[in-house]
């Protein structure tokens, strides 16, 4: 438990969470307040510590795959394929080309629904409930695609080491393209409803400005870093899964509503990334190669002694798996590096001086998610 | 003596008139008046307005949100979310409960007004589920608070949660509150 510090008698200690509608799961913040102004933010993490990393030492390599779903349940497919890639690199397995394309497809589909949820929840935290319903409506459609592909709606378990356990059919591709067309229309509608809304802009612009240097110093990654103006996307800078075959631009914050790196930038970067993902998906469906989706592997996987760190671009930033193998069927250590944990550390630095209601907007724009922080 | 069948006494006439009046009144009101026991009518209201707490601990929370969303639409069963436990009849434990979180959930449950109900959603809340191997996870929320309905799945589909709510409604409808309590000896 935290030892609460009392600086002087005029300040008030406010407890926010672990049950709070806008903390996105079970997070707790101990706020030192002077009236409505925040003097300090102390995050208290660990309410969702499910000992995933420790379980990784107790189960075999393929059996850890369902646990990676639960590292980030909103973008579970990205976590699956990231883990599969790490073990493959450790063992030196070549994945078939079609499987790599499938992995790109599921990652981008999942990135879309993750960002949809984030934008909907951000609007809900600011007091607008309708955009959330619109976002969930679109999200359900892509959930259906995942259901056709792997049978699950939220926690997919859709990668095996060495490939994918399923193949995609022509009918599914056609349905997918239809949904993407609908999604483009929805994005325009959403822009009219939310993105260009004057109230929405004034709640987010110039709130929680993170400049490029601070973002780098706090190890922010993913959309939060890109919103600060940094051209850094692992899909492009450290390409994996044949991402180099697709043409896409990195969405970077522009500061068009206020300052570069404010909460509105973080929101609009995610809206742009949905469009980027749609274009990558369309290219991937067009150039999908035929062939096997699973490499041939021995029955029990025993990677050689050694260690590996593989990072991929998840919806919440850099998702890295650090695996130490001792030559047996179980890993000696699995460490997971997530984007949200880096993002929560910046709350105290930027949160000081904000109003309480702005902290909610700032927190929602960082797209924190509790299991990624606690694991 | 002449027969006086057609002539009624005053009392007879009055009772007959009353009967006619009652009958016509019954006919007029039969569409709008229901005769039932007080327990049943109270339970009908309670069962169709189960307000749940906006609270999710882990993955199931996303499915809970989507159950409240436009497709599954929990609103049509009278269930809407409330952000504070003091306005809730129902708490849906959506997701893994860690040992650190368990005592906080107990506090939330204690803050809810009676009568209160609990739905345990998903394998983790039922029994620990996938995280049975872990060292920091409570194996079943029923070790902390009493559970009315268990919904299996990891995570359960919105349809499964809706079914769980309907089962709970059935339970609420069969409860009796207005019965004299037996004196305990």
Image: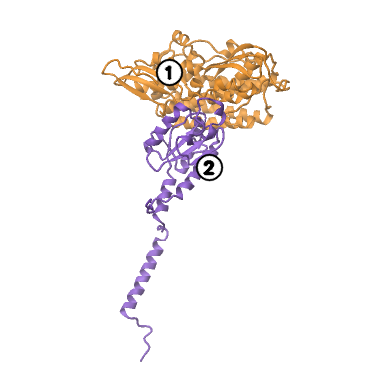
Chain colours: A orange, B purple
Q: Quadrant of residue A53?
A: top right
Residues at marks 1 and 2 on the same chain = no
Inter-mark Cα distance, 1 to 2: 40 Å
Residue at position x 46%, y 29% in the image = A131
A373 to B66, vertically: above or below: above
A263 or A338: which is nearer to us? A338
B82 or A1: which is nearer to us? A1
Residue at position x 51%, y 36% in the image = B121
Q: Nearer the viewer, mark 1 or mark 2?
A: 2
A255 to B83, vertically: above or below: above
Q: Secondary structure at mark 1?
A: helix
Q: Quadrant of the N terminus of chain A?
A: top left
Residue A341: which disc? none
Q: Quadrant of residue A164?
A: top right
Farthest-out residue, bottom: B1
Q: Secondary structure at mark 2?
A: helix
Q: Position of residue A75 (x, y in %)?
A: 55, 24
Q: Chain of mark 1?
A: A
**Residue B125 makes an appearance in the image:** yes
Farthest-out residue, front: B185
B56 to A232, vertically: above or below: below
Residue A263: which disc? 1
**Residue A201 makes an appearance in the image:** no
Pointer 1: residues within 10 angstroms few (<14), some, or many (20+)?
Answer: many
* Count of labels in the image: 2
Q: Position of residue B158 (x, y in %)?
A: 53, 37
Pointer 2: residues within 10 angstroms few (<14), some, or many (20+)?
Answer: few
Q: Position of residue B39 (x, y in %)?
A: 40, 53
Q: Position of residue B25 (x, y in %)?
A: 37, 64
Residue B163: which disc? 2
Q: Chain of mark 2?
A: B
């Amino acid at each position: 438990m935290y030892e609460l510090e009392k600086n002087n008698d005029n300040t008030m200690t406010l407890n926010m969470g672990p049950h709070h509608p806008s903390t996105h799961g079970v997070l707790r913040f101990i706020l030192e307040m002077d009236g409505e102004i925040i003097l300090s933010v102390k995050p208290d993490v660990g309410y969702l510590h499910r000992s995933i990393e420790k379980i990784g030492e107790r189960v075999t390599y393929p059996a850890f795959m369902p646990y990676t779903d639960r590292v980030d349940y909103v973008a579970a497919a990205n976590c699956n394929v990231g883990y599969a890639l790490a073990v493959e690199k450790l063992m030196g397995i070549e994945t078939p080309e079609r499987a790599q394309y499938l992995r790109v497809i599921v990652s981008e589909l999942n990135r879309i629904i993750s960002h949809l949820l984030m934008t909907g929840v951000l609007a809900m935290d600011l007091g607008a409930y309708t955009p959330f319903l619109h976002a969930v409506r679109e999200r359900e459609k892509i959930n259906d695609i995942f259901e056709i592909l792997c049978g699950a709606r939220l926690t997919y378990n859709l990668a095996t080491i060495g490939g994918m356990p399923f193949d995609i059919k022509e009918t599914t591709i056609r349905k997918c393209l239809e949904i993407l067309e609908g999604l483009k229309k929805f994005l325009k509608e959403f822009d009219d409803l939310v993105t260009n809304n004057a109230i929405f802009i004034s709640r987010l612009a110039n709130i929680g400005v993170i400049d490029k240097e601070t973002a780098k110093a706090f190890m922010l990654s993913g959309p939060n870093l890109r919103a600060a103006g940094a051209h850094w996307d692992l899909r492009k800078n450290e390409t994996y899964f044949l991402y180099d075959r697709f043409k896409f631009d990195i969405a970077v914050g522009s500061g068009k509503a206020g300052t570069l790196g404010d909460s509105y930038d973080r929101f609009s970067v995610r809206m742009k990334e949905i469009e980027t993902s749609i274009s990558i998906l369309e290219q991937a469906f067009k150039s999908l190669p035929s062939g096997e989706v699973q490499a041939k592997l021995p029955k029990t996987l025993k990677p050689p002694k050694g260690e590996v760190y593989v990072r991929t671009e998840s919806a919440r930033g850099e998702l890295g798996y650090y695996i130490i193998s001792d030559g047996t069927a179980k890993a000696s250590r699995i460490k997971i590096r997530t984007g949200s944990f880096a993002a929560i550390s910046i709350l105290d630095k930027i949160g000081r001086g904000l109003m309480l209601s702005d902290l909610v907007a700032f927190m929602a724009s960082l797209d924190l998610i509790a299991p990624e922080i606690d694991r | 003596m002449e027969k006086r069948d057609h002539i009624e006494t005053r009392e007879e006439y009055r009772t007959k008139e009353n009967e006619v009046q009652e009958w016509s009144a019954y006919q007029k009101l039969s569409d709008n008046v229901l005769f039932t026991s007080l327990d049943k009518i109270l339970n009908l209201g309670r069962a169709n307005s189960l307000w749940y707490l906006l609270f999710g601990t882990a993955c199931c929370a996303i499915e809970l949100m989507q159950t409240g969303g436009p497709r599954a639409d929990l609103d049509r069963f009278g269930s809407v979310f409330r952000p504070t436990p003091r306005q809730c009849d129902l708490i849906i434990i959506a997701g893994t409960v860690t040992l650190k979180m368990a005592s906080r959930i107990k506090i939330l449950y204690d803050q809810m007004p009676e009568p209160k109900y609990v739905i345990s959603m998903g394998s983790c809340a039922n029994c620990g589920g996938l995280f049975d191997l872990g060292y920091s996870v409570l194996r079943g929320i029923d070790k902390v608070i009493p559970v009315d309905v268990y919904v299996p799945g990891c995570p359960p589909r919105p349809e499964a949660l809706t079914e769980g709510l309907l089962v709970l409604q059935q339970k609420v409808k069969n409860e009796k509150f207005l019965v004299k309590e037996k004196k305990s000896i």
